Image (tube, rainbow, N blue to C red):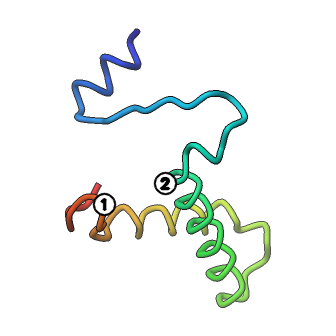
Amino acid sequence: GPFDVYCKEHGIRHQKTPPKTTQLNGLAERMNMTIVERMRCLISQSGLAQTFWGEALSTVVHVLNLSPSAPLEGDVP
């Protein structure tokens, strides 16, 4: 479908797992946990209200996307 074509054109490796089997998708689950941990820390340390979670999420993801990654052999996404 169009999504698969988009992924292929942009060098995105799309892997599917069966529904309700998060244990089979460890890398994505670990990244989700990392994002949530950093988001909570950012909100806590900044003293901002919990209502700023969206901005904290955007900031954390932005910083992670600019950071080198071991699974990508030091490259950035």
Q: Nearer the viewer, residue 48 or 20?
A: 20
Q: Do the residues under discs 1 and 2 have CB atoms within 8 angstroms?
A: yes
Alpha carbon separation for disc pair 1 and 2: 10 Å
Residue wearing tag 1: 71
Whichever of callouts 1 and 2 sits on the residue coming sooner in the sequence is 2
Image position, residue 31 (x, y; %)? 52, 60
Where is mark 2, residue-wise?
Answer: 27
In the rendered image, residue 12, in percent from the top left (x then y), is placed at: 30, 36
Q: From the viewer's perspective, tell me whether residue 70 is left or right of residue 41.
A: left
Q: Nearer the viewer, residue 20 or 59?
A: 20
Residue 36 position (above or below residue 41): above
Q: Quadrant of the N terminus?
A: top left
Image point (42%, 63%), residue name: 62
Q: Residue at x 29, y 54 (%)?
A: 77
Residue 69 rendering spot, x and y as whole percentages: 30, 66
Residue 6: x and y in percent read 31, 22
Q: How many discs appear?
A: 2
36 to 10, vertically: above or below = below
Q: Toward the viewer: 58 or 27?
A: 27
What's the residue type where badge 2 is placed? Leu
Name above or below for residue 18 compared with residue 2: below
Q: Is residue 17 above or below residue 56?
A: above
The residue at the point 64 percent across, 47 percent down is 23
Which residue reaches farthest top? 1
Numbered label attached to residue 43? none
Q: Residue at x 39, y 32 (%)?
A: 14
* Picture quadrant of residue 5: top left
Q: Secondary structure at mark 2?
A: helix
